[in-house]
Image (spheres, rainbow, N blue to C red):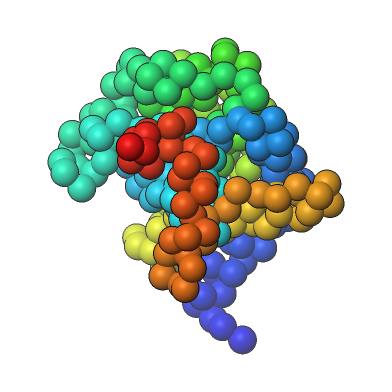
């Protein structure tokens, strides 16, 4: 049996399954209703949570009806310190949502481990105010220990909360005095892929065909994706704009 860090990660995944099996099913049902009504799935996050936004967008096996909610200033790769400042800056999340202009029957997914910075909180609050259901992929336990930089928490504006069970501070190794090995990306990515699996099964039960990308690196992938690009690129500018 695995010991040490592998065993700990597996235990965290089991904890996520125990806490969030029903919320993930509820979230999948919300996403399916949006897709069935020809809505979009708006996905937001900042800092390293942008890794999860990338995981949802233009991804082999992922949904073609995803639109990323983001601003370049929250990407750490260009200027890490500036990205932290941007995530904490009031008004930026609100402006991102206003630019995307989500409305029913759309749904929103917001990734944020702490859920306490203005950027993800504003995205969730504004989407909810527009009548767009919000799925929060977060850790309430980590949020309780995080610095309060917004007047509310991400969970306060969520229709469904998927608890990733990420411990406060994110890092998990060595046990008892953790200094390294952050777990949030592993756990949130697993939660998203489990949601996609639940979504597939729900859609199959209703006889619905999900708009999923095929890997461009397998024979016929580009051809299979072409009709999805034609269907969504005028509604998702991040796919490259309208066809000529």
Question: Which x, y percent locates residue 6?
Answer: 51, 75
Mark count: 0
State which quarter of the image contains the C terminus: top left
Q: Quadrant of residue 30?
A: top right
Q: In this view, which residue lies farthest toward the right?
A: 205
Question: Which x, y percent locates residue 177?
Answer: 40, 61
Q: Quadrant of residue 138?
A: top right
Is 40 left, or right, of 210 in this rendering? Answer: left
Name the residue rendered at 70%, 50% in the picture.
209
Q: Is residue 194 above or below residue 3?
A: above
Q: Quadrant of residue 50?
A: top left
Is 227 left, or right, of 38 in this rendering? Answer: left
Q: In this view, which residue lies farthest toward the top?
A: 129
Q: Out of 145 and 160, give the one closest to the viewer.
A: 160
Q: In this view, which residue lies farthest toward the left?
A: 79
Residue 140 visible? The answer is yes
State which quarter of the image contains the N terminus: bottom right
Name the residue rendered at 66%, 49% in the picture.
210
Residue 107 visible? The answer is no
Name the residue rendered at 38%, 42% in the picture.
239
Q: In this view, which residue lies farthest toward the front?
A: 244
Q: Out of 66 and 20, give the one closest to the viewer.
A: 66
Q: Is residue 40 above or below residue 57?
A: above
Name the residue rendered at 52%, 39% in the picture.
231
């Amino acid at each position: 049996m695995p010991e040490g860090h592998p065993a700990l990660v597996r235990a965290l995944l089991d904890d996520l399954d125990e806490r969030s099996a029903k919320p993930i099913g509820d979230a999948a049902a919300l996403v399916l209703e949006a897709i069935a009504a020809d809505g979009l799935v708006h996905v937001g996050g900042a800092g390293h949570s942008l890794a999860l936004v990338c995981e949802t967008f233009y991804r082999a096996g992922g949904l073609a009806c995803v639109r990323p909610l983001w601003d370049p200033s929250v990407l750490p790769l260009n200027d890490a310190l500036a990205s932290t400042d941007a995530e904490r800056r009031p008004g930026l999340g609100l402006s991102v949502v206003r630019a995307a202009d989500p409305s029913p029957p759309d749904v929103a997914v917001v990734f944020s481990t702490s859920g306490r910075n203005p950027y993800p909180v504003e995205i969730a609050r504004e989407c909810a105010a527009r009548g767009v259901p919000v799925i929060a992929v977060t850790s309430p336990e980590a949020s309780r220990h995080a610095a309060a930089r917004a007047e509310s928490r991400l969970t306060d504006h969520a229709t469904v909360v998927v608890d990733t069970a990420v411990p406060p501070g994110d890092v998990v190794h060595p046990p008892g005095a953790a200094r390294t090995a952050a777990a949030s990306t592993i756990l949130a990515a697993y939660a998203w892929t489990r949601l996609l699996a639940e979504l597939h099964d729900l859609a199959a039960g209703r006889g619905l065909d999900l708009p999923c990308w095929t890997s461009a690196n397998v024979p016929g992938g580009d051809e299979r994706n072409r009709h999805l690009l034609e269907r969504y690129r005028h509604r998702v500018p991040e796919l490259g704009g309208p066809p000529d």
